[in-house]
Image: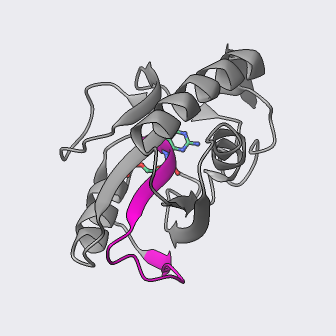
Amino acid sequence: MDSIEPFLSSDQIAARLKEMGESITADYAGHDLLIVGVLKGTFMVMSDLVRQIRLPAQFDYMAVSSYGAATKTSGVVRVLKDLDQEIAGRHVLICEDIVDSGLTLNYLIKSLAVRGPASLEIAALLYKEGIQRVPVDVKYVGFRIGPEFVVGYGLDFDEKYRNLPYVGILSQS
Ligand code: 5GP
């Protein structure tokens, strides 16, 4: 049976996303922003974060394969859906739910960088500290966390728990 131990409350998340939105607003002042969400997990982070960004922004989405029913990274990144828009010359901010091994973002950054954006940065709600298998430079980090497998607030286990309004640590018995 799954049990979920509350870890980050909705209030904590909302407060941190407000701060992140303020930093992003200040850093990109005077620029148009293209915010790219990495489906599916980011849908909740993205909708709450972008409401804290006071700038003209456009949106696009990519979908990549994730872990399926397993809680360990496979190391394989498969693009299921590419961007609809061109990014050459544009300021692109990738919005992610969580950075674990870093393999997904490392791959995305490499594949988007060659398209010639004016800038390319990452905002992630959660960053698992010290376990990246490849280097990833995440400019806006919500919370630095341990290696535990977390669910809720968009994050799933086997497609469950995405709609929890908080982040919890999953344990299975
Ligand atoms: P990475 O490529 O950095 O290892 O992981 C990228 C993806 O793996 C995330 O976008 C997310 O979908 C999934 N993932 C990594 N760690 C976790 C976790 O603790 N919980 C959940 N639910 N998904 C995770």
Question: Quick check: 47 above or below 77?
Answer: above
Give the mark count.
0
The percent position of residue 36, horizontal first and vertical second, equals: 51, 62
Q: Which of 39 and 28 is in front in this view?
A: 28
- For image coordinates 51% across by 50% down, the residue present is 95
Q: In this view, does 83 lie to the left or right of 119?
A: right
Q: Is residue 159 left or right of residue 146?
A: right
Q: Which of 115 and 32 is in front in this view?
A: 32
Colouring scheme applied when the structure was drawn: one colour
- For image coordinates 24% across by 45% down, the residue present is 136
> What segment is highlighted magenta in the picture?
79-99
- For image coordinates 59% across by 49% down, the residue present is 55
- For image coordinates 71% across by 54% down, the residue present is 159
Q: Residue furthest front?
A: 30
Image quadrant occupied by the N terminus? top right
Q: Is residue 173 visible?
A: no
Is residue 92 shown in magenta? yes
Question: Quick check: 114 above or below 145?
Answer: below
The percent position of residue 141, horizontal first and vertical second, equals: 43, 30
